[in-house]
Structure formats: structure tokens, C-alpha cells
Amino acid sequence: MNEMKKMYTDNQNIFRNSFAESIFNLKYKHEGAETWEELSSTLVDDVCGGLLPKSDIDQLKFMISTMRFIPGGRYLYYAGRKAKFFNNCYLLRGEEDTREEWGHLANRAMSCLSSGGGIGIDYSKFRGKGSLLSRTGGEASGPISLMLAVNEIGRQVMQGGSRRSAIYASLNWQHSDAEAFLHAKDWKNMHVPGTDKTMADLKEADFNFACPLDMTNISLNWDTKFIEDYWKTGELPELWYKNTRQALSSAEPGFSFNFFENENETLRNACTEVTSEDDSDVCNLGSLNMSRIEDIKDFAQCTELATKFLICGTMKAELPFDKVYKVREKNRRLGLGLMGMHEWLLQRKQPYEVTEEMHRWLYIYKSVSDKVAKQSADALGVSRPVKIRAIAPTGSIGILAATTTGVEPLFAVAYKRRYLKDGKKWMYQMVVDSAAQEVIDRYGTDPDTIESALDLSSAYERRMEFQADVQDYVDMSISSTINLPAWGSELNNEDTVRPFAQTLAKYAHRLRGFTCYPDGSRGGQPLVSVPYKDARKNLGEEFEEALETHDICDISGHGGSCGV
């Protein structure tokens, strides 16, 4: 670590590129946190002051200031502010099949969204559409109606005054409304009365045009019965194939996997990496940046300190209502994640796969965080965390660190990235991926030969295998979006649905969730690949964007992120 301190002292600027610095200035810079180093110091004092010894506090300040560990975006935003809403998202469940619970759930959702946190809701408890209501003699409107209502709450709530609402909705695959749920966001087949247009046409023309569940990511919950039936018969239910087709053609619904001892953990945050079975549970996120940690010894020390930081966060973060405090005290979930994994591989000239060396690092990540979480909780006199690791998409903090996000391969060597400025105006910059540029500069690599997510879109099983291999070390979930070619293209069409579905089923028992993003399936996608030469010519320039981007979870990667 002494060598790393010298390296940091020699750096004139911690940000690798102007875009990273502009995102810091746009989203996180404020009075008392004018520089990244000031923000790092203020944040550690806010979260760990009075709880950890000075040696740990000093090391944490250094770790964060050098971007070797970056807490979630809400931590960064609220550092030094009077309010301390450090948590990104809240996990909710429809607990009773009553009209009263509709109101209570909507109230919980609004409270969470207005505090700056996203929400995820499992609606499986509510009876299906058309079911008899014995008390009134009427018919139930079904859970999708409530999803639509919550979506409209989200449309009107700017979270914490700074970002669009992030919402997730799920439904069990055996629910009577599961088939309708599959098509709840099938805008291309929703015709607008009085026009020859579909919802998708109008959304493409004006991103602010209101479409059903356009603020909400959706997934079907697949449980133990599904996986046991599949193993016993070798057959997949037709609904599995239909779920796959919808994902390959329109990106949603995704898949939520909850098998055996995890069967009741159907609650997810908006980007699905944190799991729980308890209504009103909460995220608590931070990510180790593997690309800036030089050796496994330092990685172990970073894992130890990051775990302690998140434990302290469970003691300092403010929450929106009393039940969340009670559930947090019971579960004390930590969401210690990883980022910069693909850059770490590129630094070693290794392909996008979990190599033997990476397995050793992942073992340290698991074993050290398990041990330290228990020891730190005992030392601080609080309950031990029930779960410790969850890998978020790390959209905004991935930009700050200018590295590859979460477990994702770099999206493209160069791309156009859209973002919201001053809460009103959509802008874009041309970006050369910093991990790619480092490989280009250091080794003289041809940019056209660097493997990216777009290259891997034709090799989806490699993405599934990578996610499964990492999931073996993660006790909650991984948020990852697999990029695919556009629907209707040679590699993604009606003929590819069944082979894709069968391959996914092979890995399902080793995953906790799965999402894919066919190119162009949502209007205004936040990242668009551009030629490397074009991006190099326009680096640092800021352009106004005519079309607003689909930004469901904050400044996102490719299909959504939690702003972490």
C-alpha cells in the first residue's frame, strides 16, 4: 500500500479522463466536497467517525480517494449533507391480498422513492385479474394494475430531487397473470387509438411519452418447482420459451432465479443484485475496484476495510420509515461488490473468463468479507449480517473510476454516452473506454482487436458462464446485462429462441438472475457504439442531445444501473 500511496502522490488528477471528472462535477461535487479527495475524507468521517479506529479511517480515506473502493452513489451524493440517505434502494413485497395493502404498499413505495432510493416489489401475493372479490361481489383488477399505479407514482417523483425513479416489479411464473405480465411492456404491439402508430413509435419520437411500465424493469420469478421439474424431465415449460422470446426481442421481462434455500428471496432492488425475503429491506452498496488494486495482499486489506465501512453504514444511514429500521437491524445486509473485472483481465492480457488467478482473488473476496463482517458486527455490538456480497452494475461510479462496470466486459472501445445535465437537459460526449485506451497506449494494441460486449453478443454462453463462475462467490446476486444483436438479425431471431432458452436453463441453477439487451430494443439507449477514430477527434466536447435517453436507474450502462 505504501507504493500505491506514492503512486497517488505522483498523480496530478485522480480522474482518468475529462468525462469522469465532468460526472463528478455534475453529480457529486458540492460544498465541503469540492474535490474527490475532499469528498472521500468527508464521507469516511460521516460514516465511520466514532466507530472505527483512526488507522482504519485513514486507510479508508486513502482507498476511496484512490478509487480502489467506491461506495454506492447515494453514499457519495449525501457525503457532508445534512440528510444521510446513504442507501440506494428498498425491497418491498405485497404482503396481504387486500385492498388495504394496495394503499399501504403504494405509501411505502412513495416514501422510499422520495428519499432518493429506488424500489423493487414482488407482486405475487395479489390474486389474478378477474378473480372473485367475496366481500364486494366484484372482480379483482390484478397485480399488473397496481404495477401501473406504482409506475405512475414513480413518474411524478424525482428521487431526492436528483434523478428519475428506479423501479422493479416481479411476479411468480405460476401466477395466473404471468402470461399477461410477459407482454406488459410489449409496446410494439400496443396500438395508439386514433393513429396508425404504436406505443413504441411514439416513445421513439418522444422519450417522455408515457408508456405502460416505462419507469419499471420487470422479471418473472422462477422457483424450485421449475428447476426440479426441468432436472427430472429434461423438458422446459412453454412459458420459459415465451419469457426468452420476450427478452430476446424487447429486453423484458428478465429472469429472477430463486431456488432451494433462496426460494423465498424473491425481493430485489431496482437493479436486482440485492435479494431478501423480508418486506422493507434495504440495499447497502459499495464496490472494490479490481483494476486499481495491484496484488492479492492489498486486495485482502481492501476487502477487510470495505466490509467495515458497510457495517458502519448500517448504523449511520437514515431510512424513510420505521419498518425499514427494524428489518435492517434484523438482517443488516451488506452489498459488497466488485468492478473493473474486465480491465483487470485486460491488464493481464487474459480473455474474458474467470481464470485461475481470478478464482484466487474471488476466494479472498468471499472468505475475508465473511470473516470480517462477523468480527466487526460483534466488535460494534450489532447483529451479524445475514448476507454480505452483491455485485451491482456500478454505472455512475464506473464512469468516475473510468473502468469496466461490475462483471461486464467493456461495452465498446468507443461510444457516445448520454447524460442528464442540471436535471433538465440531455447531453452527450464521445468517450473512449479508458481500459481500452490503456491497453492501446501501453501495448500498441489495435483498437479493432479488443474484445467488447458487442463482440461477445455473438457468444452469449461465454457471458452466462462468466456470470455463473462469479456467482459461486456471491451470496446475493449479480446485476448483469448481456448485450445481444438486434431482434430479427441473423444471430437473434425466432429460430434462435429455443437454443438460447435451453442454454440459459443449463446455467440457471448457478445464477440468481439474468437480463439481456437486444441492440435498439429501447428508444434512446444511453450507450451507442461509435468508431474509435471519431471518438478520438471529439474527446472532451459536450453536445446537446435531441432525444432523451432511457435512464430508468440513473446514468446507466446498457440496460440500466443503480447509479452506484
Image: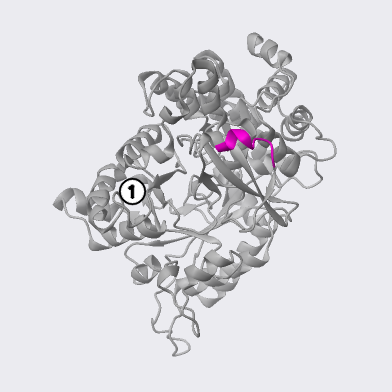
- Judge by depth and name the residue closer to the eye, 243 or 221: 243
Residue 54, compared with residue 543, is above or below; it is above
| Residue 102, picture quadrant | bottom right
- Judge by depth and name the residue closer to the eye, 71 or 549: 549
Name the residue located 41 percent from the left edge and 22 percent from the top edge. Answer: 358
Residue 509 shown left or right of residue 97 in the figure: left
**How far across and down, in percent of the image, does residue 471 sit?**
39, 36
Q: Is residue 196 magenta?
A: no
Name the residue located 39 percent from the left edge and 68 percent from the top edge. Answer: 183
What residue is pinned by disc 1?
Answer: 259
Span highlighted in magenta in the image: 534-541
Q: How many marks?
A: 1
Name the residue located 33 percent from the left edge and 48 percent from the top edge. Answer: 259
| Residue 225, picture quadrant | bottom left
Residue 247 shown left or right of residue 60 in the figure: left
Instruction: Residue at the far left: name it.
Output: 233
